[in-house]
Image (cartoon, grey):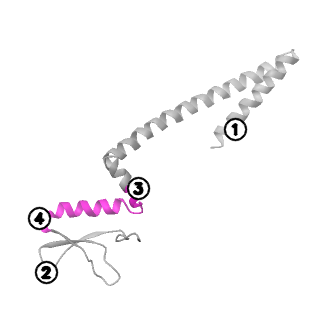
Amino acid sequence: MSEQKHTQEPWQIEQSEDSDYLRIGRIDERGIMPFVICSLHDEANARRIVACVNACAGAEESTLSVINAMGGLGEFWKDVGEANTQLMGIKQQRDELLNMLKRTQDSLSHISLHSECPWACGRIDEAFEEIEGLINKVESK
């Protein structure tokens, strides 16, 4: 069974010249808008339908079904907002940790230069290289 394709976006609203109805949809290559949906009294509904269809342009029907099952776009955008807030906090923590690594790297370089203990210098140099690798990894993203 093949999946029915919907009318491509963008959709628009047009008032029928010969009736009290609004047509919504997309004007095809013949200049025809095939959908007659609502009466003139339902213009707000027609605008909402067109706005929703155009806002979902490019989205797979399966994705839209999942969003609908989650409570609709209102809940979806709320979840996106919460995720964005969490992401901003994570980025701030990353930046703070990166700055701490840089300060530690700077301190280790001064200790290594002034230390007379070969064992300590070796350990400090290893830590310095590990910190440098972490800094490069974070800064390259």
Q: CA distance from mark 1 to mark 4?
A: 62 Å
The three-letter code of the residue at mark 3 reads Thr
Q: CA distance from mark 3 to mark 1?
A: 37 Å
In front: label 3 or label 4 = 3
* Magenta stretch, main secondary structure class: helix
The crowding category of the residue bearing disc 2, from other C-alpha atoms within 10 Å (few below 14, some 14 to 19, many at least 20), is few
Answer with mark 3 or mark 4, whichever residue precedes in sequence.
4
Secondary structure type for disc 1: helix
Quadrant in which the N terminus appears: bottom left
Image x and y of residue 12, in percent: 28, 69
Front: mark 1 or 4: 4
Image coordinates for residue 138, horizontal then vertical, percent:
64, 38
What is the quadrant of residue 43 in the picture? bottom left
State the residue position of label 1: 136
Marks 1,4: beta carbons within 8 A: no
Q: Give the Cα separation between the discs numbered 3 and 4.
A: 32 Å
Residue 18 image label: 2
Q: Position of residue 109 (x, y in %)?
A: 77, 24
Q: Position of residue 110 (x, y in %)?
A: 77, 21
Query: Which stretch is magenta?
Result: 39-64
The residue beneath circle 3 is: 63
Q: Which mark is residue 15?
A: none
